[in-house]
């Protein structure tokens, strides 16, 4: 899709252009050379659109530079004709702005920076000139503009600066008397419309470039779409891509799975929604994997607009404070909090990571100072104020889907978010609220609809155990609670919700895993033969460490909630099913034992889960019929012939 720049300013799409632009280091290509310029990673898209009559273009700039904003200039070359453009602002490591006046034509051009008497080629792009409706800022307005669809105004669109929220009038025009608390302005996409996209990213915001008291214009364009009353949202928990543990290859398996699912449902209205930690801040520099690289990999997902939620690992370790640590995220991905509408549902994306990073923590491989990752899990007071303004336009009969990275509740149902009560008191005014969270890499559900109208889905992780289990044991991609790496499919029909967890690489009817206790004995001598005494002693397999003849069968049902029904019969006789807290034995051998056996720390060791169930059979060789019915009446079955051998090969898919 084309990138757009408003009349005064800034090309928001460029700051996300890792998905269709390119990074370019400016190198001398021609003419006399004096002092070599130091400009790295100027982000250029394939197309830039600006208003007729002149506009400021702002490009993302990463790294140090010796550009002199008062003396150097940008040159746009069309054929053999050069047009000089004055540099209007320069924020080192952030952005370069220059003014294009009314004399500059449309068409293909090359961009140079003239520095010290030499011209340095930075790349090329197509410049398009757009004629816009003349709009004057009202009164104290500092941000204003128009929302259109096919050139026609769209009324009633909510536009926000991150604190205030207003609606467009009958001409699609909005006015904000804003102090510009965020470096951008964004829209809440209305039902029946979609934003333009750049790869997987929806164009929902425009970066700002002028001082807080200076008025600037930002326009938005929408696309009218068919009825969205029925739609599907694919929800993706932690990805943690870091260019390690074969993660990018494993991620391609996930992309393949998503593409196959969307292709099989090509007639459905479908979107994506992440839950944070797409990247891993610790490896941005050391492994050269940042947001640009993430977008390059994620853009292999076909035809799916994906809204993003920020996680703690999407905050920079090279800055301090909650504002400075999210500069890159805001440039390349999206606002850290915003809303949008699909069909009858209002979606709200929150940032519940308040980052401080106040403690220096040494240097990375390139000598850059890092800070210790320090943060609180709460929704900031600024967001709470914005949320109230945003929801003031939403009737309380409207169902909400709220996303944030860290969970609202623990897997036992107690409050986890620091200001959980404050947030709950706002949300519970609505008829039904589904909160999707991640962070734990587990799957669990907390149903408080009876008294708070809230159901939380702690929705697992795409990366499972940070991509480690399948790295150590190919074919076994599971998290510390035994849940497979995967994603949640949320199907919406009007105000009715249905959900299902899908394991990457498996059919949607793969919802549980069974273990025959009699065949499992996880001893250090068998599974950690090469481990030193310290690592061998740290292996804690719980009940699985001893041989048993109790004829017990265990069922790990990861997406369980109390409305599910589990039935187990033996020779037609029903067996009593009990819910227990226990570790998953497959994760113990696929990851924990493998790491310890290499005399390495099992950083993400197997953890207890609350979705394990137990039955006791009458003997060691009987066949059990296992039937699980979810809360929507979907039935999942297994005929479990016993004894069932326990090997990692038996559980691969």
Image (tube, rainbow, N blue to C red):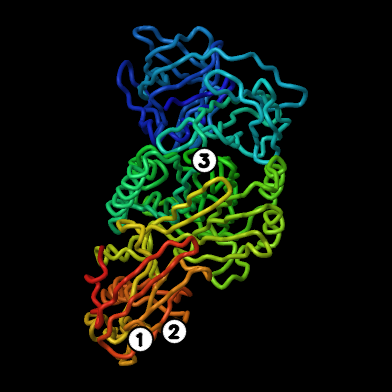
Comparing 584 with 183, the one in front is 584
Which quadrant: the N terminus?
Answer: top left
Q: Is residue 178 left or right of residue 477?
A: right
Which badge, 2 or 3, is on the more N-terminal residue?
3
Would you name the residue on which mark 3 appears?
334
Q: Position of residue 201 (x, y in %)?
A: 45, 38
Disc 1 vs disc 3: which is toward the camera?
1
Residue 649 in picture, x, y percent from top left: 22, 70
Q: Quadrant location of the C terminus?
A: bottom left
Relative to 42, 327 lies left or right: right
Mark 1 lies on residue? 552
**Circles 2 and 3 in contact, beta carbons < 8 Å:** no
Among numbered discs 1 and 2, the one appearing first in the sequence: 1
Label 3 SS: loop
Label 2 sits on a secondary structure element that is: loop
- Circle number at residue 576: 2
User: From the viewer's perspective, is residue 8 above or below residue 427?
Assistant: above
Q: Earlier in the sequence, mark 1 or mark 3?
A: 3
Q: CA distance from mark 1 to mark 2?
A: 11 Å
Disc 1 from disc 3: Cα separation: 50 Å
Picture coordinates of residue 436 (x, y %)? 53, 56
């Amino acid at each position: 899709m084309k990138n757009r720049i408003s009349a005064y300013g800034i090309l928001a799409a460029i700051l996300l252009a890792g998905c269709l632009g390119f990074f370019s280091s400016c190198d001398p290509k021609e003419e006399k050379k004096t002092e070599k310029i130091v400009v790295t990673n100027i982000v250029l898209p394939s197309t830039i659109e600006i208003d007729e009559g002149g506009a400021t273009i702002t490009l993302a700039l990463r790294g140090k530079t010796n550009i002199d904003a008062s003396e150097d200039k940008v040159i746009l070359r069309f054929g053999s004709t050069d047009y000089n453009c004055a540099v209007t602002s320069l924020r080192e490591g952030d952005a370069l702005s220059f003014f294009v006046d009314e004399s500059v034509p449309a068409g293909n051009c090359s961009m140079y920076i003239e520095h010290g008497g030499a011209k340095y080629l930075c790349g090329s792009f197509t410049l398009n000139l757009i004629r816009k409706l003349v709009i004057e800022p009202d009164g104290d307005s500092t941000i204003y503009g128009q929302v259109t669809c096919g050139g026609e105004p769209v009324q009633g669109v909510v536009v926000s600066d991150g604190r205030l929220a207003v609606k467009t009038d009958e001409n699609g025009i909005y006015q904000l008397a804003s102090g510009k608390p965020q470096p951008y302005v964004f829209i809440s996409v209305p039902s029946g419309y979609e934003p333009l996209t750049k790869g997987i990213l929806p164009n929902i915001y425009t970066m700002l470039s002028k001082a807080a008291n200076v008025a600037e214009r930002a326009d938005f364009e929408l696309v009218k779409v068919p009825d969205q009353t029925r739609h599907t949202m694919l929800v993706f928990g932690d990805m943690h891509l870091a260019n390690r543990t074969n993660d990018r290859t494993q991620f391609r398996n996930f992309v393949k799975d998503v593409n196959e699912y969307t292709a099989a449902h090509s007639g459905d209205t479908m979107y994506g929604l992440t839950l944070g930690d797409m990247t891993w801040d610790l490896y941005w520099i050391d492994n050269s994997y940042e947001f640009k690289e993430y977008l390059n990999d994620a853009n292999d997902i076909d035809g799916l607009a994906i809204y993003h939620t920020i996680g703690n690992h999407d905050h920079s370790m090279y800055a301090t404070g909650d504002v400075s640590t999210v500069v890159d995220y805001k440039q390349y991905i999206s606002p850290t909090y915003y809303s949008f509408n699909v069909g009858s549902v209002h979606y709200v994306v929150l940032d519940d990571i308040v980052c401080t990073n106040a403690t220096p923590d040494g240097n990375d491989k390139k000598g850059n100072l890092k800070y210790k990752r320090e943060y609180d899990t709460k929704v900031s007071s600024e967001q709470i104020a914005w949320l109230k303004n945003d929801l003031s336009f939403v009737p309380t009969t409207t169902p909400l889907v709220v996303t944030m990275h860290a969970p609202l509740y623990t897997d036992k149902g107690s409050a986890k978010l620091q200001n959980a009560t404050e947030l709950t008191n706002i949300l519970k005014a609505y008829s039904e609220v589904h909160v999707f969270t991640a962070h734990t890499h587990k799957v669990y559900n907390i149903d408080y609809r009876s008294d708070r109208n809230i159901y939380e889905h702690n929705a697992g992780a795409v990366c499972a155990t940070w991509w480690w289990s399948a790295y150590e044991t190919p074919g076994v991609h599971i998290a510390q609670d035994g849940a497979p790496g995967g994603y949640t499919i949320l199907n919406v029909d009007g105000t009715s919700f249905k959900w299902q967890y899908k394991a990457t690489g498996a059919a949607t009817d793969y919802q549980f895993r069974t273990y025959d206790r009699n065949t499992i004995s996880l001893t250090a001598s068998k599974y950690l033969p090469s481990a030193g005494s310290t690592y061998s002693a740290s292996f804690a397999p719980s009940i699985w460490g001893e041989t048993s003849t109790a004829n017990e069968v265990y069922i790990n049902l990861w997406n369980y909630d109390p409305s599910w029904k589990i039935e187990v019969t033996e020779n037609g006789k029903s067996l009593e099913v009990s819910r227990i807290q226990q570790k998953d034995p497959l994760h113990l051998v696929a990851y924990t034992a493998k790491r310890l056996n290499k005399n390495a720390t099992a950083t993400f060791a197997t953890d207890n889960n609350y979705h394990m169930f137990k039955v006791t059979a009458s003997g060691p060789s009987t066949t059990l019929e296992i039937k699980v019915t979810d809360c929507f009446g979907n039935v999942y079955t297994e005929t479990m012939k016993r004894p069932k051998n326990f090997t990692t090969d038996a559980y691969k898919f």
